[in-house]
Image (cartoon, rainbow, N blue to C red):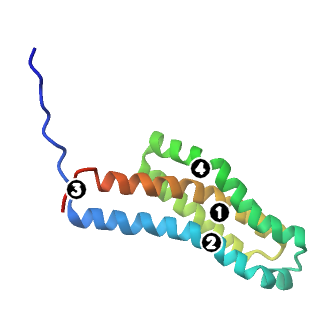
């Protein structure tokens, strides 16, 4: 029996790996930063939106709950429909929900926008890791 040895896959261009690292890290950074920013802004949200304590709790929890529940789904969507494509979808959903949250005039609208942000982040976060793993395969020396 003969064994066929396949040549190694070509290494991605250096500029492409850098761009992948920067753009993928951006999504991860935005998803993580969002939690800190909103937690810092809670007193202002309470004053400006007239939000009660339960509203403030749901402002944080809506994001975290949807994010945690949909993270595996986000990774599966990336495997099924393409990681880059779904990463872009997640980034667009996250950005649109961020704009909606910034423009909200009441606690209900803010909580809804935060839940949608969590869905976008649930797509972004797992795909960030897979895109970086694909850009820097094991054994790639530079």
The location of residue 74, given as percent across then percent down, is 55, 48
* Pointer 1 residue: 117
The location of residue 21, given as percent across then percent down, is 36, 65
Q: What element carries label 2?
A: helix
* Pointer 4 residue: 71
Nearer-the-camera pick, 4 or 49: 4
Assess whether mark 2 and mark 1 are in contact (beta carbons under 8 angstroms).
Answer: yes
The quarter of the image holding the N terminus is top left
Residue drawn at the location 28% of the way across and 51% of the way down:
137
Q: Is mark 4 on a helix, strand or loop?
A: helix
Q: How far apart are labels 4 and 2 at the CA level?
A: 16 Å
Label 1: few (<14), some or many (≥20) within 10 Å? many
* Pointer 3 residue: 12
Q: Earlier in the sequence, mark 4 or mark 2?
A: 2
Q: How far apart are labels 1 and 2 at the CA level?
A: 9 Å
Assess whether mark 1 and mark 3 are in contact (beta carbons under 8 angstroms).
Answer: no
Nearer-the-camera pick, 100 or 62: 62
Assess whether mark 4 and mark 3 are in contact (beta carbons under 8 angstroms).
Answer: no
The location of residue 49, given as percent across then percent down, is 84, 80
Label 2: few (<14), some or many (≥20) within 10 Å? some
The quarter of the image holding the C terminus is bottom left
Q: Is mark 1 on a helix, strand or loop?
A: helix
Q: Which of marks 1 and 4 is nearer the N terminus?
A: 4
The quadrant holding residue 12 is bottom left
Farthest residue, direction left: 2
Q: Which of marks 3 and 1 is nearer the N terminus?
A: 3
Tell me: residue 75, above or below residue 93: above
The quadrant holding residue 100 is bottom right
């Amino acid at each position: 029996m003969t064994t066929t040895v396949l040549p190694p896959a070509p290494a991605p261009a250096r500029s492409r790996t850098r761009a992948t690292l920067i753009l993928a890290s951006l999504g991860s950074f935005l998803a993580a930063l969002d939690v800190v920013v909103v937690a810092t802004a809670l007193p202002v949200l309470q004053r400006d939106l007239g939000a009660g304590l339960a509203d403030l709790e749901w402002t944080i929890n809506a994001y975290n709950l949807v994010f945690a529940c949909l993270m595996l789904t986000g990774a599966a969507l990336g495997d099924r429909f393409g990681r880059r494509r779904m990463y872009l979808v997640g980034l667009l959903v996250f950005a649109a929900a961020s704009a909606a949250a910034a423009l909200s005039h009441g606690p209900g609208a803010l909580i809804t926008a935060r839940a949608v942000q969590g869905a976008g982040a649930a797509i972004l976060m797992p795909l960030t890791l897979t895109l970086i793993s694909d850009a820097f395969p094991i054994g790639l020396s530079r």
